[in-house]
Structures are given as C-alpha cells and as structure tokens.
Amino acid sequence: MKQIDLFREIIVDNFAGGGGASTGIELATGLSVDIAINHDPAAIAMHEVNHPDTEHYCESVWDVDPKEAVKGRKVGLAWFSPDCTHHSKAKGGKPVKQSIRGLAWIAVRWAIAVKPRVIMLENVEEFKDWGPISKEGKPIKEQKGQTFQSFVKTLESLGYEVQFRELTACDYGAPTIRKRFFMVARCDGKEIIWPKPTHGDPKSLLVQTGKLKPWRTSYEIIDWSIGVPSIFSRKRPLVENTMKRIKRGIDKFIVNNPSPVMVPDKSKAAFLISYYTEQSDKEVRGLSLDRPLHTITAGGNRFGLVTVAFLTKYYGQGVGQRLDEPLHTITTKDRFALTTVCTNGQRIADIGLRMLQPNELFAGQGFPPGYTFNIGNKSDQIRRVGNSVPPQFAEQLVRANLPEMCVPEHMNKYYSKAN
C-alpha cells in the first residue's frame, strides 16, 4: 500500500483524459500527479500506463468526493479541463447541453471542499461566452457571458484572485498552433504570473537575436519511414472533393511557392517506389497546372525526380498547410493528410497521400518521445489526442506559478528521451 505523506501538497487532475496536462505537470515537478479523474475507461487506461504512480478514479467528476479523495492532504494545484465541445464554435448551430457546459462548476466544488491553493482551468476561447441557453438548446445572445461572470465571481467570493487569457501552444515549444483559454485562480496571496513565450516566429527579431527559439514545425513530427501510397494505384479512386483539395494544395504550396518543402533524401526510398519506376516518364492526367514547376531545382533520385510535400486538411479553414510551420489544430477526427508530389521540375510524375498516424499526431500535440498512446483502436487514439492539452501549456503555467514545486528540466523522466 502506498504511504501517504500528509505534509506534502498534492496535485489533482480532473478530466485527466490521456494525460496531456498531467504530463506537462510532471515535466515541471518531476512527479506524477497524485490524483487523476476521468469517466472514460480507455482514457484512464492510457493515463495509468504513463502515470503509474497516480491514484486513478474512473468515474464522473461529480461522483468523486474531494475530501475523501485527498485524505486530509492539502492541495497545492487542482487542474480542470472540462469538456469544451458545447462551448466551441466548432459546434456550429447545433443545440448544446447545459449539463456539459456546466462541468466547469466542479472547480467551485473543489474550492469549497478542500480549497486548493492554485486552480488552473483550460478550455476553448469561447468559454468566456458561457451563458444561459434557450429551450431549443441555443445560447441566448443577449445573455452571452453571464454564466462565466458568475463563475468568476463565485471563485472570488471564496477568496481567490482570478485571471484569464488565451495562450498559443507553439509559443511554448509545442509544434502546433493550438490556441486555448486558461484561467488561473489562487488564494495564497501570491501574484498570478503568465509564462513568457519560449518560442516565436523564425522571422522575428527575438528569434533572430537568440532571445527566443524558433517555433517547432510539423515537418519534425512526420514519421518519414512510413510510405505514402500513390493516389493513382488505389483500389478505390479518391472522391472528387479530395482531388480538388490536392489540386489546390499543389497550386498553393508547390506551383506558386518559390520554396516548397522537400522530402528528406534519406527517406525517399520509402515513397512511391513502384510508381516512380513505372511512371517516371509520364505526365499525370486530370491535374492540369497553371504553370510549369520551374521553381523546384533541387537534385532528385536517379530518374532526376524530387519529392516535395505539404499537408492537406479535410475540414476547417484553408486547403492545407506547409510543413515548415507548426501543425494546425488537431481535432478528434482524421483531419490531416501528408501529400507528396514527385516531379522532375517540369511536370508531375506521381502524387502520394496518407493520413497522419496517431504517433505523428501525439508528437504534433507536444507529447514527449516514448509516451504510450497505442491503447484502443486508431479512432480512439485520434479522439484522445484531439481532446488533449499540449503538455507544454501545463508545464509552463506550473513553472511560472508554483516554482517551489518544480525541478530543473533535466530532472524529469522525459528529458533524456527528448535530447
């Protein structure tokens, strides 16, 4: 039986999911969170594998009694990532559920019951608009933000100072542009501190003068050892809309781009080998281009071919993205397809397409190397990473506000794997 230290402040992760926030907290403190709560058995299973020293509760956050869970120990930090889907603009005009939008009130329950010294809450940007909904399940525009304001005032009435703002993951070392709302509330009289960015736009003066590191890119999270099958050798042809996306992506990221992203030489053998051999001297039909591909001048393989790549997006804004920028927001469904184009500089010899795999998406979300994610089927894994908190958010917020609980970077278990 694990011995309980009644004198050490503990850390609780509500809505723990697959462990994004918990991992970030561990990166900062060097210790697993003490308590993790989530209703999803698969999520808890993933969390248990990666955080075996944590006490896990596989049940609704409302069914866990805070006083019973902490067993007399003081709570230094309580983290909350309540379901964001019924606040998010991605919900569109569909009805929302008040019961899910109201999950954030669990933070108040913990504040009343065990008075965590620091409370941190993460959600979508629209969380600030939290307000009453109509009988039809639609937010009432005239009362937008009223419930959120009541939520903040309730915490303040319990003795907490409350601040909130939006942060972007790539500014703190995650290779994704994911943007999220964060609230920090503390009742110990100490100042709330917002972490300063550690990374920035490579073109910025701060990066060029060495004051910030450059944003990490989606290029580095691609597993180049995975082959990319030709779109022309599929048993079932791609649907017309996908072909249009590919065409628009080629126009934007290759034809009209003076510096398309090249596939690394060492991995070219993994790409489209059979089609290179059979079709390298033929032009692909059905994808007419506006102009020759003169801009691609790098050397190729023995056929004089080079392979360039970009990401096609299946929904959301834009046709795709370059690989030399942070990955756009990862969702709970398959969204990104690695698209490769083999060309001799004048014409296209082949096009490859495959969806990004869970290992690439977890890396893109900022999870450290060696994190175990392969629990459940592929859809489960993608849903879990789409719902997760990039660990860098939690790490930097904890380092800024709870330095007394933190250890140097080299003392966390993930350091040696990442360096």
Image: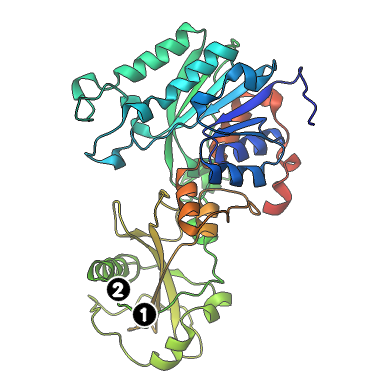
Mark 1 residue type: Arg
Mark 2 residue type: Leu
The Cα–Cα distance between marks 2 and 1, rounded to whole angstroms, is: 8 Å
**Mark 1 residue element:** loop
In percent of the image, x 51 and y 49: which residue is there? 365
Q: Residues within 10 Å of mark 2 (few under 14, many from 20)?
A: few
**Mark 2 residue element:** loop
In percent of the image, x 22 and y 75: which residue is there? 290
Q: Are marks 2 and 1 in contact (CB under 8 Å)?
A: yes
Could you tell me if residue 326 is visible in this image? no
Q: Position of residue 310 (x, y in %)?
A: 40, 65
Could you tell me if residue 30 is visible in this image? yes
Nearer the observer, 305 or 93: 93
Nearer the observer, 2 or 12: 2
Q: Position of residue 220 (x, y in %)?
A: 54, 60
Q: Is residue 407 left or right of residue 345?
A: right
- Examine the image and state in which quarter residue 110 appears: top right
In percent of the image, x 49 and y 85: which residue is there? 273
Q: Is residue 20 left or right of residue 104?
A: right
Q: Above or below — where is 29 with respect to 151?
A: below
Mark 1 — residue?
234
Q: Position of residue 138 (x, y in %)?
A: 22, 30
Q: Residues within 10 Å of mark 1 (few under 14, many from 20)?
A: few
Mark 2 — residue?
238
Q: Above or below — where is 28 with respect to 164?
A: below
- Examine the image and state in which quarter residue 1 appears: top right
